[in-house]
């Protein structure tokens, strides 16, 4: 499903489960549908591949200026899940947490650039059975991915991982499609007038609805 078709207001987080191997707590993320719960999976817009770590099974991607709605969608994923955690904090942690405390502990999905000459980026985990498809439709190996490829990803919001001093959303890529072997970035998401917005630490509140609702 394309990201624009996802109704994030139907997303929920489930009870905490302790992951003994990683020594952290995890809460699965699901979507409510008429026939029950389903995984929160979506197709991204086109992204620029910045880096690959085959051993850690992660990639870094850059948002493209042609697709500002996908950037805003990921902001909304963050805001919606953070709000769900706040609203359910008593059930999750045994006591009600303040929104400010949760904001400070939350590691946002989007990495903002240090200056306006670059676009925001994001780190994504590659799932064990991830398919990588080249332009001809052939399934290829992860070694065939190259920096500056233009790609589209099928992404699953698997869970939220809670550690002692932080928590973050765990995104898993199920499929990577190489759209173009060379990505030509000529514009940037942020204009000069948006520098104050870029440097603001309150961007989550701009996207999210009132935390007290």
Image: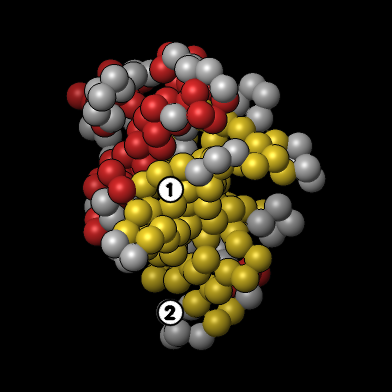
Distance, label 1 to label 2, CA atoms, is 20 Å
**Residue nearest the observer in this picture, 28 or 50:** 28
Left or right: residue 154 compared with residue 20: left
Disc 1 residue crowd, few under 14, some 14–19, many 20+, Cα 10 Å = many
Disc 2 residue crowd, few under 14, some 14–19, many 20+, Cα 10 Å = few
Describe the element under mark 2 as helix, strand or loop: loop
**Residue nearest the observer in this picture, 167 or 15:** 15
Residue 32, labelled with which disc?
none
Left or right: residue 126 compared with residue 3: right
Q: Which residue lies furthest to the right in this view?
A: 21
- Scheme of colours in the image: secondary structure
Describe the element under mark 1 as helix, strand or loop: strand
Q: On the rendered image, what quadrant is the N terminus found in?
A: bottom left
Q: Could one spot residue 154 in this view of the protein?
A: yes
Q: Residue 87's spot in the image, x, y percent? A: 39, 27
Left or right: residue 191 compared with residue 28: left
Q: Name the residue under label 1.
A: 62
- Which of pointers 1 and 2 lies earlier in the amino acid sequence? 1
Q: Do the residues labelled 1 and 2 touch (CB within 8 Å)?
A: no
**Residue nearest the observer in this picture, 128 or 29:** 29
Q: Residue 211's spot in the image, x, y percent? A: 30, 22
Left or right: residue 56 compared with residue 78: right
Q: On the rendered image, what quadrant is the C terminus found in?
A: top left
User: In the image, what residue occupies the spot 34% across and 26% down?
Assistant: 204
Q: Residue 95's spot in the image, x, y percent? A: 53, 18
Q: On the image, which quarter does residue 161 sit in?
A: top right
Q: Name the residue under label 2.
A: 135
User: In the image, what residue occupies the spot 32% across and 39% down?
Assistant: 76
User: In the image, what residue occupies the spot 57% across and 25% down?
Assistant: 93
- Vertical order, 69 against 103 (above or below): below
Q: Could one spot residue 47 in this view of the protein?
A: no
């Amino acid at each position: 499903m394309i990201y624009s078709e996802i109704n994030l207001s139907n997303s929920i987080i489930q009870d905490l489960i302790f992951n003994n191997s990683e020594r952290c707590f995890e809460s699965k993320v699901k979507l409510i549908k008429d026939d029950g719960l389903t995984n929160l999976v979506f197709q991204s817009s086109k992204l620029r591949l910045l880096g690959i770590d085959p051993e850690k099974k992660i990639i870094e991607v850059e948002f493209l200026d042609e697709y500002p709605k996908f950037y805003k969608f990921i902001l909304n994923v963050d805001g919606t899940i953070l709000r769900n955690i706040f609203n359910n904090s008593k059930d999750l942690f045994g006591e009600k947490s303040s929104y400010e405390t949760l904001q400070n502990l939350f590691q946002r999905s989007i990495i903002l650039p240090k200056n306006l000459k670059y676009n925001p980026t994001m780190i994504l985990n590659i799932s064990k059975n991830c398919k990588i498809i080249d332009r001809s439709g052939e399934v290829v190996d992860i070694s065939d991915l190259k920096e500056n490829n233009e790609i589209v990803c099928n992404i699953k919001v698997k869970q939220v991982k809670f550690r002692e001093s932080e928590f973050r959303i765990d995104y898993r890529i199920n499929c990577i499609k190489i759209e173009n072997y060379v990505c030509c970035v000529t514009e940037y998401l942020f204009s000069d007038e948006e520098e104050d917005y870029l440097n603001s630490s309150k961007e989550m509140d701009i996207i999210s609805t009132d935390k007290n609702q």
